[in-house]
Image (cartoon, rainbow, N blue to C red):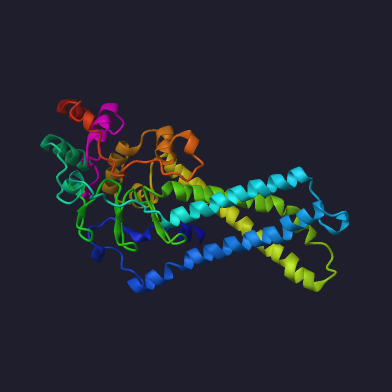
Amino acid sequence: FFFPLLSLPEGATSVSSPKRGRPSSCPPVATARMSYIYPLFVIILISTVYTTFLAFNLIPQINAVNSDDTGNYFYTPSEDELYGILVSFHLMFGMLITCFVLASTSSPGYIPRETSEDRKRWVDGDFEISDRDDNQVKEIIQNTDADLTDKNVISWLKSIVILERKKQYGYYRHCSACNLYKPDRTHHCRICDRCILRMDHHCPWISNCVGHRNYKFFLLLLFYAIASLCFVLGGMARRLVYAFRPIMNTTTFLLEDLIVLIVYLICMFLFIALCMFFTFHMNLTLNNMTTIELREKKNNGDRFIRHRFNVAHAKFDNGYWENFVEVFGPPWMWLLPIFPGGKGTYLGISGEKGTTSEGDVKSRLVQ
């Protein structure tokens, strides 16, 4: 139930025209209106958890520290412990809000058309690929027995400007909705009605696509949500136990203890679900994959689709460390919501073109 809501690749379609994609269940106007419901729900949920944690846990502890009669409070921390929790929690919570805003409002990355070179590639479809390289790409795409483990073959694949092709015949991928040629890993989102660079999925909870430019913000949003929930679950544990004391006042139980219990259970559910979801996306990051690539290509029942994915993935996969740095940047900015840079078009390394001879490549395509 939970994962389809968190990750919604249904907004993406790799076909050229939306008419050939999966039909939308709602008209565009209704979809636009409903797109604000999920973020609003998230804001209400965050506000409820924060208010409950503040009103029934932090403020009573502040009062307990400043009071001479500590018997009326469920727990009296030391001043160092209290202020340490206050500063640490609000730091995590502030980063959570920042990442939520950035993930929701930042551009996921669109096909560039600013320069004449961009328009030459993505509007006109002139990629300056030699006929020899183009024919070899078509050959390796059609040959499901090709050896994709040879370092020379991988080096050659990384040098190709556009490696992902349409079907097994090797045609360039073109989006008729945007009237643009697609860079590698780009997909058209029928919800946003735009082609998204390195599209991962369309997330209804932030009402935005998750792509090249905001994928790090999305991952940090998950990370700081988990960190904030750790503070809430750990900090409210004593308050939760206190809620199971004998009921002396029904009003106090309904307006305080019952609210604490419900919010705590919600936080436990969110913590488990978000940890699983974050682990899933970290695995994708380390392997340089997207949700669309995993679900619709790597795990596809068609062996030609799986083979085309393996060919393209050989170009993108640079090892765990490089894959991680590609998304998060250098170590000093790992935990900061700063875009690490890059165009997201995954153009081949032109300096390596032609370094491997045609005979060397062909001799290694078949094991």
Please say if 138 is above or below 195: above
Q: Nearer the viewer, residue 78 or 277?
A: 78
Please say if 355 is above or below 129: above
Please say if 298 is above or below 53: above
The image quarter in which residue 164 lies: top left
Res 225 seen here: no
| Quadrant placement of the C terminus | top left
Q: Residue at x 53, y 66 (%)?
A: 41
Q: Find residue 7 and report its horizontal and vertical position in percent.
A: 44, 56
Res 164 seen here: yes
Q: Residue at x 28, y 44 (%)?
A: 345
Q: Nearer the viewer, residue 302 or 353?
A: 353
For the record, the magenta segment spans 143-167
Q: Left or right: where does residue 23 sit relative to residue 68?
A: left
Q: Find residue 127 and report its horizontal and vertical position in percent.
A: 17, 42
Q: Nearer the viewer, residue 33 or 275?
A: 33
Residue 156 within the segment the image draws in magenta: yes
Q: Find residue 350 and report its horizontal and vertical position in percent.
A: 22, 33
Please say if 179 is above or below 220: below
Q: Nearer the viewer, residue 131 or 144?
A: 131
Q: Residue at x 80, y 51 (%)?
A: 65
Residue 355 within the segment the image draws in magenta: no
Pick out the residue farthest to the front.
66
